[in-house]
């Protein structure tokens, strides 16, 4: 696989492109531009969530464990009393649950270059980002979802590009990892069926609740 820094910097470039386009052409405000930038960068790192060790996984889970409770805050505030003690407890418990609970589970259940390194996972991530942002505006949701999808695909392309090497510094050769990143299915039929069902389900929710209007 390509190195963590390569994925991170490619995410920065992709994010800068999308947020510049969003701000200059589609008149996003600076906060919306920053969100688009973060989505592209997250997408560029996200597939390595199935790598069992090192910085990528740690950073990704830290990001996810902060991002998800923050995004869900408006939905859960009516369930609490909006006091400082309630918000501190909510963020601390959510962080611990996602970082140590869900994170450990994903580490145990996934194999590197499994379904997270695939085109359907990139589509599903983009759909979820669309759902997250559509309540702000459809324009922002479309740009943020495109940024997430592009970030993920960029990651897969860089991993595939890294499958080439020069044997004895001369002969172009392929590593065994060739074809394990940019793929349409996992080795597990059950996982493949599950992810395509999830894509269809989320697409149905989107078209039912928030039909895309051009
Ligand atoms: Zn990777």
Image (tube, rainbow, N blue to C red):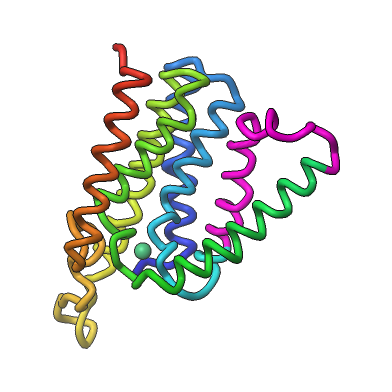
Relative to 82, is 102 above or below? below
- Residue at 36% over, 39% down: 126
User: Could you tell me which residue is drawn at 79 percent across and 32 percent down?
Assistant: 81
Q: Nearer the viewer, residue 80 or 14?
A: 80
Which quadrant holds residue 129?
top left
Quadrant of the frame with the N terminus: bottom left
| Relative side of 153 to 68, left or right | left
Q: Which residues are magenta?
A: 59-85
Residue 66 belongs to the span the image colors magenta: yes
Q: Is residue 6 magenta?
A: no
Question: Residue 13's spot in the image, x, y percent?
Answer: 45, 44
Question: Percent position (x, y) of residue 150?
Answer: 34, 42
Residue 135 to residue 51: above or below: above
Q: Is residue 192 left or right of residue 76?
A: left
Side of 56 relative to 90 (left or right): left
**Principal SS element in the magenta part?**
helix
Q: Please state the horizontal and vertical placement of residue 154, each as a whole percent of the image.
A: 33, 50
Compared to residue 11, the image places residue 159 above or below, namely below
Q: Is residue 157 left or right of residue 25?
A: left
* Residue at 29 percent of width and 66 percent of height: 114
In the rendered view of the protein, which quadrant contains the C terminus?
A: top left
| Camera-side residue of 164 and 72 | 72
- The residue shown at (20%, 78%) is 176
Q: Position of residue 207 (x, y in %)?
A: 29, 23
Picture quadrant of ligand 1: bottom left
């Amino acid at each position: 696989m390509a190195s963590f820094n390569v994925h991170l910097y490619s995410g920065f470039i992709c994010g800068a492109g999308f947020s510049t386009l969003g701000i200059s052409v589609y008149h996003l405000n600076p906060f919306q531009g920053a969100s688009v930038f973060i989505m592209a960068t997250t997408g560029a790192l996200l597939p390595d969530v199935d790598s069992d060790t090192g910085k990528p996984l740690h950073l990704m889970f830290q990001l996810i464990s902060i991002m998800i409770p923050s995004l869900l805050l408006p939905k859960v505030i009516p369930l609490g009393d909006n006091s400082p003690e309630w918000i501190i407890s909510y963020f601390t418990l959510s962080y611990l649950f996602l970082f140590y609970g869900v994170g450990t589970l994903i580490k145990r259940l996934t194999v590197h270059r499994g379904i997270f390194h695939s085109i359907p996972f990139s589509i599903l991530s983009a759909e979820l980002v669309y759902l997250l942002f559509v309540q702000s505006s459809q324009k922002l949701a479309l740009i943020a979802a495109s940024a997430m999808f592009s970030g993920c695909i960029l990651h897969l392309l860089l991993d595939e590009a890294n499958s080439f090497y020069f044997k004895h510094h001369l002969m172009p050769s392929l590593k065994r990892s060739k074809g394990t990143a940019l793929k349409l299915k996992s080795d597990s039929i059950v996982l493949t069926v599950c992810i395509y069902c999830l894509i269809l389900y989320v697409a149905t929710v989107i078209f039912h609740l928030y039909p895309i209007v051009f």
